Image (cartoon, rainbow, N blue to C red):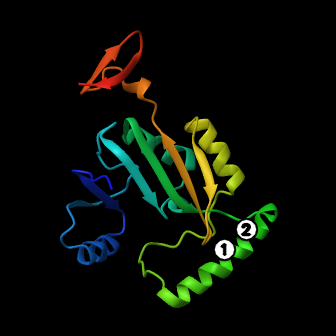
Amino acid sequence: ARSFPRVVAIDVDAPVLGRARARFPDAPVTWCHGDILTHPLAAESFDAVLSNAMFHHMPDTRAALRRLSQLVRPGGTLAIVGFLRVEPRDLPWAVTTTLLRGVVIRVRRKWPHTAPTAWPPRDSVRELRQAAREVLPGSRVRLLLLGRYLLTWSRPAELARGCPGTRQIGRASCRERV
């Protein structure tokens, strides 16, 4: 497994951060209380940006996708796990995942949170895929069990023009690290 020298966790809900910090007291994590949309994180400063169960709380899916993508370094990855609003065409998946999620919650108990509940999610799988196509060309959205989806996107290395730690090769690519 690949390790990361710096991990930053950010959440708008301070009690959630406190429980995470208590659960992982020795983790080399910088814990930040704040809003990912406005927190002063530097553009292109992360090799990987991971979001879990946050997107249905965001007021504007496209703006949130843009913000998270701006944080990813060229050649880096954005991965989002979230919940979707169910449309009639999604019913077979939704029924299966709801039953499975019910079993898991009963066996493992649900993670308590104090964040305001934003339910049902705003976007359907169709709407999320459309937003992702517009904001993150080349992204992929997959349906997961337990009522979730996984959106993945890799920032093209060609966008690294003028990036610290890269050298321009040819006309517009920065594929070689120095």
> Which type of secondary structure does the marked residue at label 1 adopt?
helix
Q: Residues within 10 Å of mark 2 (few under 14, many from 20)?
A: some
Image quarter (top left, top right, bottom left or bottom right) of the C terminus? top left
**What's the residue at 42%, 82% (across, down)?**
112
Q: State the image coordinates of residue 138 (x, y, percent, origin top left).
A: 58, 36
Q: Residue 111, labelled with which disc?
A: none
> Which type of secondary structure does the marked residue at label 2 adopt?
helix
Q: Residue furthest right?
A: 88
82 displayed left or right of 30: right
Q: Amino acid at mark 1?
A: Thr
Q: Amino acid at mark 2?
A: Trp
Looking at the rendered structure, the number of numbered marks drawn on it comes to 2
Q: Residues within 10 Å of mark 1 (few under 14, many from 20)?
A: some
Mark 2 in CB contact with mark 1 (< 8 angstroms): yes
**What's the residue at 55%, 38% (across, down)?**
136
Q: State the image coordinates of residue 32 (x, y, percent, origin top left).
A: 26, 59
**What's the residue at 40%, 18% (across, down)?**
173
Q: Using the image as rendered, state which of residue 78 and residue 57 is in the foreground.
A: 78
Write down the quadrant of residue 130 in the picture. Answer: top right
Q: State the image coordinates of residue 69 (x, y, percent, origin top left).
A: 44, 41
Picture layout, residue 97 above or below residue 56: below
Q: Residue 93, labelled with which disc?
A: 2
107 displayed left or right of 114: right
Q: CA distance from mark 2 to mark 1?
A: 6 Å
Image quarter (top left, top right, bottom left or bottom right) of the N terminus? bottom left
Q: Residue 97, labelled with which disc?
A: 1
Q: Residue furthest top?
A: 171
Q: Using the image as rendered, state which of residue 161 and residue 116 is in the foreground.
A: 161
Q: State the image coordinates of residue 4 (x, y, percent, origin top left).
A: 26, 51
Picture layout, residue 77 above or below residue 50: above
